[in-house]
Amino acid sequence: MLIEVERLTKQFERRRPSRRPWDVLARRPVPTPSLVVAVDDVTLGVRAGEVYGLLGPNGAGKTTMARMLATLLEPTTGTAGICGYDTQRDAGAVRARIGVMFAGERGIYWRLTGRENLEIFGRLQFMPGHVIQERSAALLEQLGLAERADDLAETYSTGMKQRLNLARTLLHDPPVLLLDEPTAALDPAAARATRELIRTLQRAGKAVLLTTHNMHEADEVCDRVGIIDHGRLVAEDRPATLIASAGVEPRLELQLHGDAAAARQILGADALWWGDDQDDGGIAVAVSAPAGWQSAERIAVSLKAAGIAVIESRLREATLEDAFIRLTGSRLGGSFESI
């Protein structure tokens, strides 16, 4: 394992409100600070050539976990190791073997050009000059920044700054990558290219820890997924296995036209209706379809027999989002593409 985490816990002291002058004069006692558990007794490992997705909503503990692995935070209890080096005892050795990218953080110097940014970070990694030039040119080309490489980073769009930050992360060719929401703020084309790059890195033998709340991204690029909720790892497996083990079923989404009351009687209490019945008799509903299209055909026959027209039907297979809701009882940030 290139990343090893054993019973890792991180607690933060909740900030106390400052004492007002009259509280001091009245000698009111100072309240005892409470603790917030950001990461709670997590154990996991990531092998060479594996993309591990840490999946959860904002505030679940994903970034705190990545910061501990990057030696930026000390764990309260437990241990973490990178390439056999302990993140607390051997922090210098760990930093030489990781590439780190945190969402929402600057990560680059805005008053330097893209190329100059990579040069300075390469020198901080003690890379030879010719290697810095070769790697920089290749990464700038690969990430679509070659034409703007000699422009100041402050003139870059948000997505371009994100891509330059990723280039900085990959420059010294580390064996372990800690990528926190790497496609945040990227347009769809750039996000797709980034996911393809992550897969290329995986095939090159890198161990990648990817934190995300993007269901599609996790399903597409991750070999294994750990679902984290309120700091605890509640499930861990391959995406398809997680979906199957959660017991979620395919759903049939229907656009109907006809008697809404009759449709409700046929489809039963478990059907999910959204929006109001339209004035022209249009109805939108989703129903469980455990047998896939066989269930769809049976439902369609029953509806047509009652004089209800099926305008459109679409079968949606169970997703990681469905599994997350079933396993945690909550929903990730963002909106559903479907019910």
Image (spheres, grey):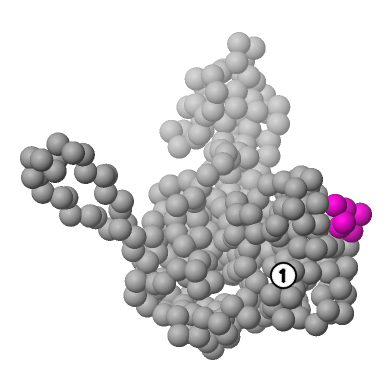
Question: From the viewer's perspective, is residue 116 above or below residue 312?
Answer: below
- 251 and 210: which is toward the camera: 210
Which residue is rendered at x = 41% and y = 80% of the image? 79
Look at the image and tell me in which quarter the C terminus lies.
Answer: top right
- 3 and 319: which is toward the camera: 3
- Give the left or right position of residue 235, taking residue 260 as reference: left
Look at the image and tell me in which quarter the N terminus lies.
Answer: bottom right
- Give the left or right position of residue 294, taking residue 164 as reference: left
The answer to whether residue 167 shows anywhere in this view is: no
- 192 and 185: which is toward the camera: 185
The reply to whether the magenta stretch includes residue 150 is yes
Which residue is rendered at x = 34% and y = 63% of the image? 11
In this figure, which residue is indicated by the disc labeled 1? 121
The location of residue 40, given as percent across then percent down, is 36, 66
Q: Which amino acid type is shown beneath numbered disc 1?
A: Phe
Magenta region: 146-151
Residue 143 quadrant: bottom right
Question: From the viewer's perspective, is residue 94 above or below residue 72?
Answer: below
The location of residue 14, given as percent across then percent down, is 30, 53
- Give the left or right position of residue 59, taking residue 94 as reference: left
